[in-house]
Amino acid sequence: MNWTLEVVVVPVSDVDRSKVFYEKGLGFHVDHDSRISDDLRVVQLTPPGSGCSIVIGTGLGNMTPGSLEGLQLVVSDLIRAHAELVSRGVQATDVQVYGQDGLRPMEEGDDLNNVGFVYFSDPDGNRWAVQQITDRA
């Protein structure tokens, strides 16, 4: 039996502002924006190429907006992904590398596979990482 993770709820305070951030800032596809009732709105967005979506909205649970951390996107070209984020107005860290001494700024010639990261937060402070994985073992 396959067990697939397909949706992660991201707690936000302003659905419209967050929808713009994820759609325009990150380039996520808006799968649907459904207003089920005055108290329940579900907006599902999917990163390009992903089998897992996020859901933002109202009436979805009790998580505090901005409390989610550890969300991670994976790309094959971190330098290009960083440039795209910055060009879309996302405040992202510079490319960083995990080495024997911890996290450090990327240096020319670094192999970023598995150890290269960029970090950013959404408007509420939900924290995301972008990791480069070019080869899967």
Image (spheres, rainbow, N blue to C red):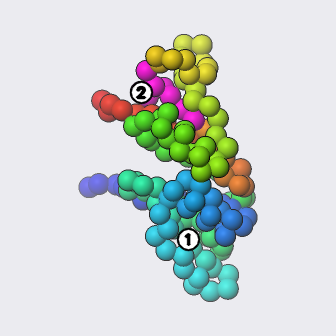
> Judging from the image, what secondary structure is the residue with disc 2 in?
loop
At x 45% / y 41%, what residue is drawn?
Answer: 74
- Magenta stretch: dominant SS? loop
Query: Image quarter for residue 105?
Result: top right
Residue tagged 2: 113
Q: x and y percent of residue 19 in the render? A: 61, 65
**Quarter of the figure that contains the C terminus:** top left
Q: Residues within 10 Å of mark 1 (few under 14, many from 20)?
A: many
What residue would you read off at disc 1?
43
| Above or below, comparing residue 68 to residue 64 in the picture | above
Name the kind of residue labelled 2 in the image: Asn
Magenta extent: 111-118
Which residue occupies the extreme bottom position in the image?
37
Gap between marks 2 and 1, in whole Å? 33 Å
Tag count in the figure? 2
Q: Position of residue 100 (x, y in %)?
A: 54, 13
